[in-house]
Image (tube, grey):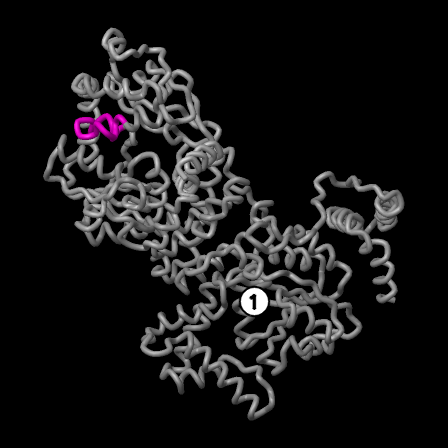
Amino acid sequence: MGHVKDIIYGGIVKRNAMVRYEYERFVMEHIEEHNRKRLLHWKVLWKLNWHYRIKKNEEPLLYKDVPEKRVEVRQSADAQLQVPESAILNRPKPYHFALGLLHYDVISFDVFDTLLFRPFQHPADLFNIIGKRLNYPAVFTGFKQGRYEAEREARNQLENDLGIREVNIYEIYDQVERKLGIDKEKGIEAEIKAEQDYLFANPYMKIVYNILRSQGKTIVLTSDMYIPGRIMEKLMRKCGYDGFEHLYVSCDYRCNKTSGELFRRVLQDYPDKKIVHIGDNQAADIAGAKKAGLEARYYKNVNEAGKAYRPDWMAELTGSAYTGLINAYIHNGLNKYPFFYEYGFIYGGVYVLGFCEWIRKRVKEEQIDKLIFLSRDGDIYQKIYNKYFESIPNDYIFWSRMANLKYLIEINQDAFIDRVIKQKALGTLDVELSSIFECFSIKADENILMQYGLYPNSVLCRENMEAFKRFIKDNWEMICRNYEEEKILVRDEVKAIIGSSKKIAVIDVGWTGSGPLGFKHFVNTNISPDIEIKCWMAGGAGGYGSGVSVLPYYMDGTLESYLFSPFHNKRNAQIHVSENVAVTNNAVFELFTQTQYPSFRGMSESGKYVFDIPENENYKMIAEIHKGIIDFCELYRKIFAKDSYLYNISGFDAYRPFAKLAFNKKFFEKNFINVINGYGLSGDNKHQCIETIGRRMEHYYANNRQKK
């Protein structure tokens, strides 16, 4: 009878994807009514078949939020151009997945990588942590390799003795004790404890599991595993799974899923029951179940799903922890996240978290007594540092390229001219001289200006650029005097923040070091030469085609970079400043540390902060990016709290996720071309025109073509 029902159900429900989706969703949302008024639901099913199969109508009938046809997107880097990564698999909603299982009597679940996740790319990477906990010296092969070899030998020995290979953890650690000299009981205890610490419930399958339990389904667990069932049961309950009726573990039954034999044990215990198995392994869970005559449902392994998008060249344990966490969170199927949230979570979180841990260590090593985070990039650094790493007092100071120019003007004539003239005259905006004077707080005499053939309403361009340069040079002392009062206000503000501190570290994103080095010079010349100041950046590119060589400051320890510099991690530095992508890399990378307020321009005569034009269009995007960064940091810190050395993420590793994007011009064009870019805003107070990243890219590539 059950077989006939299956044939009928397959014919009128399963044969059309839209009928199945809407009917099973309707049943799930009206499950109590379904049991009491079955005839009413048959009428709904008839309407759906009439609508989709007879009339061939493609418009949704019951639900307007029906997703597009479920086709698994090709696993390639180009797939990222189409949708956020979390939407690539387009898994059905958990209740919809559960709905397709309601006509079965017994539901069998695979355990590892289906019901339970480990936050690692490969399960065996947990052995690195176990070896560290056991204080096993990595002298020759290391614990991971030794543990792997011990398991292989245990299987070989069992096969020789009994003709089977399904060993348990006790037999494995007999070999571990013999080969590595580790006490068997201590080794087993350390491994089980590590599993307890790191296993967590797959949030998608947890919902599916709970729905099926609520409907009174018999649930069993079927796993190829060397941990015996009595221990596995405790691991399952620790992760919130209870109410299962039986646990079939290969080491207990001395047979596995791939052969189909372990599933036959399930069939023996539940004769005449309709059984379905759910798992992530095509060979063991799908083909193995079918060998035994069971139906099966495939749940794609999250690490397989995310494999094409994760970086290479990361250190083994860091890369495994990062990759496993990202894949479990992004690809489990429970949520589809906005693109910019994912951008922060996947690519920004690991770098910000690693940088803040690096700062914490350097603070201790250098005996710093105060941290200064420079605006605007220091905002997200300070938030994460204070939440997880705060060990000394710290403050946030408004500083910018404009502040460098104005408050260090006496040593910055060439830089000032470059900023005021070249970027405006050779740029894409028509800027009048009066607007430049206003933005740079220059009080210019109109009569003197006319002596150079210039007028306040003259548009700065190639033709009058040299005349304006002569005006600035000839009137340099007058221009410098414009900033004297403002400079005193800023000095007093900075002095109050520094207080009695004698050794300070200044934090900025990068790239040439002009921000922190400029701030250091300002403090040492205007407040005290005795204050020792270290300049710490996320990344340093000075010396790689920037026209600025700061190698002496790296070499004497004044300047240090976390991710890369011309002094270390040079491969990452070369990627970041590559001629083909440098303009995009800087602009897109700095989105991680942008803020929801504009750039600092200086202080007014009344002592109030003055800011540039706000990039309002970016603020929602920035909030999503920061939410992603914060969520990653919180999740990573929580998961790896028992082994905090995993917080120690090298700068090389922290840049690798972004490095995977660095040469993907299509990715940037698809996702960032319309993002407002605040570079070089200052200088046009009248029109307040700003550019997009796409416009900057066009201008940059056009100039490069002209040079060639």
For the question of whether residue 280 can be seen, the reply is yes
Closest to the observer, 343 or 73: 73
Q: Position of residue 560 (x, y in %)?
A: 25, 48
Query: Residue at 41% of width from left, 79% of height from top?
Result: 146
Q: Classify 596 as above or below 435.
A: below
Main SS, magenta residues = helix
Q: Is residue 393 visible?
A: no
Vertically, is 298 above or below 457? below
Q: How many marks?
A: 1
- In this image, 389 relative to 253: left or right? left
Which percent across, then down, holds residue 348?
Answer: 43, 46
Residue 220, located in which quarter of the rendered image? bottom right
The image quarter in which residue 493 lies: top left
Quarter of the picture holding the C terminus:
top left
Could you classify mark 1 by the number of other residues whose Cα lies within 10 Å: few (under 14), some (14-19), or many (20 or more)? many
> Looking at the image, which is closer to me, 276 or 649?
649
Q: Judge by depth and name the residue closer to the eye, 242 or 397.
A: 397
Quadrant of the rendering where the N terminus is positioned = bottom right
228 drawn magenta: no
- Quarter location, residue 700: top left
- The answer to whether residue 477 is above or below residue 245 is above
**What range of the chain is rendered magenta?**
403-417
Amino acid type, callout 1 = Phe
Q: Residue at x 51, y 46 (%)?
A: 342
